[in-house]
Image (tube, rainbow, N blue to C red):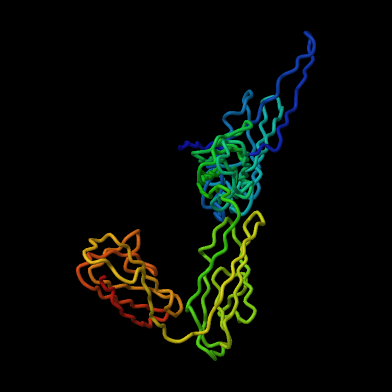
Amino acid sequence: MKRAISSTVKFLVLAVSASWLTMTGAGGAITQMPPVARFLFAPSFVPLGDGNRTPVILDATSSMGENVRFLWRADEGTFVSGTTPLSAHPRVTFPGLAAYTVVLLVTDEQGQISTMAGVIPSATGPPTASFTFSPARIPPMDGNQTVVRFSSAPSLGEGLTVFWDIPAGTFVNGTGPDSPNPEVTFPGLADYDVTLTVVDQQGRRATASSRVELDRGDPIASFDFNPAFIPPGDGHQTVVTFDARSSQGSGLMFDWDIPAGTFVNGTDAQDPDPRVTFPGQADYSVTLTVTDDQGRTATVRGTVPLDPGPPTAAFTFSPPSVPRGDGFRTIVSFDSSGSTGIRLRYLWRIQSARFENGTSSTSALPQVTFPGVRPYSVRLTVTDAAGREATATGRVPLR
């Protein structure tokens, strides 16, 4: 939804004053109304640091009174283009370093005086949009029960107007999309995008966006690291990079406990992806604790192992044979758990086999069937985290 925002020239009225004239004659006392001083100006601001380049047109023609005369007083102003402080609509320039007070004195033919003072602002920089809201998350299936309170107060700029774009939200408690501090409810079926647009008195815009998230419960701590192991006797040479980005939760903070490790490359225990070295004398325990923006915590533990050496491949299968003429009816289950190595990947090549029950040639525990017309060769290749390979072979006989 879009909203058009119009710009209006505004100024600050500092003071308005007038004197009244009372005359006495044969008919008694007659009080004559004084003049009324009024003025407008354009443009509505002086560019910041203008250096007396932009003329501001002052206009006193809306003043009221009989045969009035004008006198302008303009702080630090310079009358230009042949105009003077006595002109009805003079042109004045300013340095553009501050807000400037302008005073208009209007005198009528009886000598009565009316005064008006106003301020011509200097332009500031472009606006910035920013907002806060609380609570940061809403319960799932909330059904518009929880009121989220937004505030545009962190935004910066002169004479800001605001517009909130919250498509799935319902404004409540008398607030609306043009309120500086609206209150909004949500169905609680998803995360909800929120966009704030601010417009300053010069028509300049700025936008900020954020998201009201569903509360998906307690956080989940998770991490990975690379390389998968360190050489024995490494002596803090190998840098292990940890990565906690698989953790789940809102506004997570991280705390790593790695007793035997040394944080390097400018990282520390509060980084989501720290770099750490180890002596290389044993396997090393690692504990990660994450804390979400509601103070809830979750912990996960892992081990950085020493390099155990090249992998080994081994497998078993059951039943130990396939009936002759089986026609893909008997399921043979293979088991590679006898293989050794770090973070092994598997590749099976099984002659004439059909993989069953969602397993495949890369499963650790595949299940297959055979036609049952001959013995079938089997080859397992395992690859560890360092890319080293090992192979085991076998044969499934008929019976």
Residue 244 in the image, given as x and y percentages of width and height = 54, 67
Q: Nearer the viewer, residue 103 or 295?
A: 295
Residue 367 in the image, given as x and y percentages of width and height = 34, 64
Q: Nearer the viewer, residue 88 or 339?
A: 339
Q: For the point 77% across and 17% down, which residue is it?
A: 23
Whether residue 17 sits left or right of residue 214 in the image: it is right
Q: Nearer the viewer, residue 172 or 342?
A: 342
Residue 88 in the image, given as x and y percentages of width and height = 57, 34
Q: Quadrant of residue 60?
A: top right
Residue 31 in the image, given as x and y percentages of width and height = 75, 17
Which residue is the extreme one toward the front?
399
Q: Is residue 138 above or below residue 288?
A: above
Q: Quadrant of the N terminus?
A: top left
**In this orientation, does residue 57 appear?**
no
Q: Is residue 230 above or below residue 64?
A: below
Q: For the point 34% across and 81% down, which residue is it?
A: 391
Q: Is residue 367 above or below residue 113?
A: below
